[in-house]
Image (spheres, helix red, strand yellow):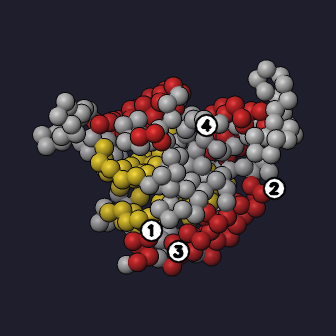
Amino acid sequence: MKIMVVGDTHGYNNALLPKLDIAGKLRIQHVIVVGDFGLWDHLAEGHEFLDAAQSYADANQLSVYAVGGNHENWDHWNWYIKHMPTHKGFAMVRRRVLLIPKVHSWTWAKQTFVVAGGAVSVDREERLERETGRTKMGAPAYNPFNGRPYRATGLRTQWWPDEQLTDADVATVDKMNVKADYLFTHDCSDFTNFHTRLKPDIDSQHHRQRIDKVIAAVKPDFHFHGHMHTKYEWKNTRSHGLRESSFGNDETDWNGHATATYGLECNSDKWSWGVLDTDNRQFTWGPHVLSS
């Protein structure tokens, strides 16, 4: 079985639809977006995005599965999960466009898939200002790009409090008591060597540490994530217990688990997609797929 893995699409047609055409040509039936899919169906353009995704998915005889990111309408996401479930626990927002619960596991072809969605919006305060048109101190809020005052969009139109993976969610993953072949998250491990790309705020750090607890619990062979909008490929032993010694990153004597980890770029970026072959247990980046 082949699965196309796609980075953040943010509700942009040009970030998703061309990839669905590629998946159709490759006869891929499952496409997984690793968060910030773009569920903004409180707006007309959000419905247009979902309708277009359904149309392209139908034309290419495939289904799109979305992991929840921090830039989703979580009020609506949770409603779909509760009221529009499928037999594997996904939520049908369109017939071929399915939302994955924030914490979820399922099997395809006798292999185990686990999802732990969510992340921290580092631009939360700016988003709240757009909702209210006011700063935290009550003064008018201004758009930093054009200097004009924000026109209030209304509460819960730019930011939703359910965006994060919580400690309770991590406990739910632990209670699953599963060994994952494949883990899909939006956020990355706190051990990821992204240098200055990792946000130093305490909320973001705590969230990444929750991801590490998930990784330690389900011990995935492969881990795919978005959120950082940066291509990154590494072998994660840190989440499983190996620590860097005074002699550097020496894994020679490590006999614990290791997770092949792939961080994807976003939107229409070159490294924003790839193909996972579950039969051969290999992941190939999109440009290499197209050149082969």
* Residue behind mark 3: 22
Of pointers 2 and 4, the one earlier in the residue sequence? 2
Mark nearest the camera among 3 and 1 is: 1
Residue type (three-letter) at the residue carrying disc 4 = Ser
Of pointers 1 and 4, the one earlier in the residue sequence? 4
Q: Are marks 3 and 1 in contact (CB under 8 Å)?
A: yes
In the picture, the disc for residue 44 is 2
Q: Say left or right for 284 vs 23.
A: left
Of pointers 2 and 3, the one earlier in the residue sequence? 3
Q: Which quadrant of the figure has residue 98?
A: bottom right
Q: Position of residue 261 (x, y in %)?
A: 36, 50
Of pointers 3 and 1, the one earlier in the residue sequence? 3
Residue type (three-letter) at the residue carrying disc 3 = Ile
- Mark 3–mark 4 Cα distance, whole angstroms, equals 31 Å
Q: Position of residue 16 (x, y in %)?
A: 60, 64
Q: Say left or right for 242 vs 85.
A: left
Q: Which quadrant of the figure has residue 156?
A: top right
Residue type (three-letter) at the residue carrying disc 1 = Gly
Mark nearest the camera among 3 and 4 is: 4
